[in-house]
Amino acid sequence: DEAWGCLYLNPLRAYLRRAQADPRIHEAIPPASAMVTFWLRQDQQDTDLADVVVAAVTRWLLTEWPLATFVFRVRPEERSSCAALERQGLRQIHLSLPGDARAYRWYRPSAWLPPEAGPAVAPGQDPKRS
């Protein structure tokens, strides 16, 4: 058996509170919401594994978990993960998080957008953090 990466599923509201998100965004997020993060080994970056992971996790969360919503969080340099999220139809949104200095890209299912989260950005565009 060989590990290809790792997947994390964490409460979204708790993270937004720690990252000092605008209180309106925090309050707009249902309590049963998750933040999904994952990483793949370097030798798996140029394979279709990111597409497989995104499709399987999205389907799993939509059908097997009682979540109101979820968002994927990825680093901008994780190009294969960003591309896989876009190919699977997830939309990129901008979240201003003054309490987290790291740059992230955020992707959401197309049926959900929190008030005040800002517009979706074009694929490949790196939203400027506030």
Image (cartoon, helix red, strand yellow):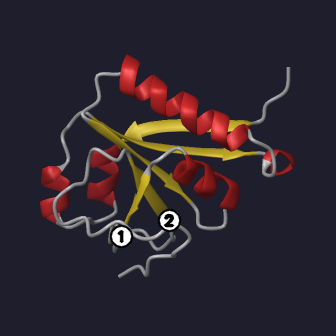
As drawn, 10 above or below 91: above
Report the side of 36 relative to 118 (left or right).
Answer: right
Quadrant of the frame with the C terminus: bottom left
As drawn, 129 above or below 97: below
What residue is drawn where x is 67% and y is 43%?
50
| Rendered image quadrant of residue 120 | bottom left
Q: Which residue is mark 1?
A: 99
| Rendered image quadrant of residue 48 | top right
Query: Where is residue 110 drawn, in percent x and y?
Result: 34, 47
Secondary structure category for the residue under label 2: loop
Secondary structure category for the residue under label 1: loop
Q: Which residue is mark 2?
A: 104
What residue is drawn where x is 78% and y is 35%?
4
What residue is drawn where x is 59% and y is 67%?
76
Report the side of 7 relative to 3 (left or right).
Answer: left
As drawn, 101 above or below 29: below
What residue is drawn where x is 85% and y is 19%?
1
Query: Where is residue 23 drawn, in percent x and y?
Result: 15, 63
